[in-house]
Image: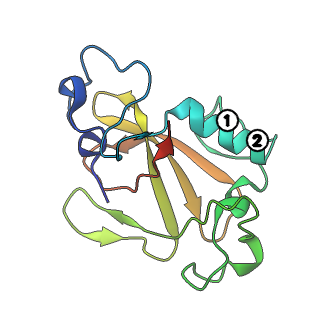
Amino acid sequence: LYQWAEAVQYQNGASNTASPSPAFSGNVKGICPTGWHVPSDGEWCTLTTYLDSTVNCGTFAWSGTNAGGKMKLASSYWFSSISISTNSSGFSSIPSGSRNFDGSFGRLGDNNYLWTSEEGSSSNGIGRDLFFSDSRIGRNNFITKSVGWSIRCLKD
């Protein structure tokens, strides 16, 4: 679980309280291995709308009908969600939970939070949320960069 600035490897002076300068353009390697990068909000949009054409990438909220279910591994890792976790996309998401800004951990078993390389503001990142009891996908722009979320690297 990584804070946003760590996920983007402090590139261009990015921190959990300041925006990168200059702003990111193109792929952001961040903590990903060579040949991979932290997905942008747009790349997440491409994936989720491919899986579910009803996903609304223009809103910061839960949307779609089943992109989240198609991305979650059908396993006992998720709290009682086998019926809405099909993993038909092969994404194989598991519930990693989060690290809270105070250092405590939470939501293990019910959520998989995933950073993008983009910001909602100088102190907030943009991410995606998969929840155990929901087959939709969440898009958030109000998450404090100092919390720990997962990263799913994307091949260049």
Q: Position of residue 103 (x, y in %)?
A: 19, 64
Amino acid at circle 1: Thr
The alpha-carbon separation of the residues under discs 2 and 1 comes to 6 Å
Q: Quadrant of the N terminus?
A: bottom left
Q: Is 5 drawn above or below residue 76 in the view shown?
A: above
Residue 128 as seen in the image, left or right of residue 68 = left
Residue at point 45% right, 48% down? 153
Q: Are marks 2 and 1 in contact (CB under 8 Å)?
A: yes
Q: Position of residue 146 (x, y in %)?
A: 24, 47
Whether residue 55 can be seen here: no
Whether residue 64 can be seen here: yes
Residue at point 40% right, 56% down? 150
How would you rate the neighbour count of disc 1 (Cα within 10 Å): few for under 14, some for 14-19, many for 20 or more? some
Given residues 93 and 148, the one toward you in this image is 93
Q: Could you say which disc has been placed on residue 107 in the image?
A: none
Q: Is 61 drawn above or below residue 22 in the view shown?
A: below
Given residues 89 and 76, the one toward you in this image is 89
Residue at point 62% right, 82% down? 75
Q: Residue 129's image quarter?
A: bottom right
Q: Could you say which disc has been placed on residue 50 in the image?
A: 2
Q: Residue 45's image quarter?
A: top right
How would you rate the neighbour count of disc 2 (Cα within 10 Å): few for under 14, some for 14-19, many for 20 or more? few
SS for callout 2: helix
Q: Which residue is mark 1?
A: 46
Q: Position of residue 54 (x, y in %)?
A: 81, 41
Q: Position of residue 108 (x, y in %)?
A: 43, 74
SS for callout 1: helix
Q: Is 95 drawn above or below residue 64 in the view shown?
A: below
Q: Is 28 drawn above or below residue 53 in the view shown?
A: above
Amino acid at circle 2: Tyr
Residue 114 as seen in the image, left or right of residue 19 = right
Given residues 110 and 114, the one toward you in this image is 114
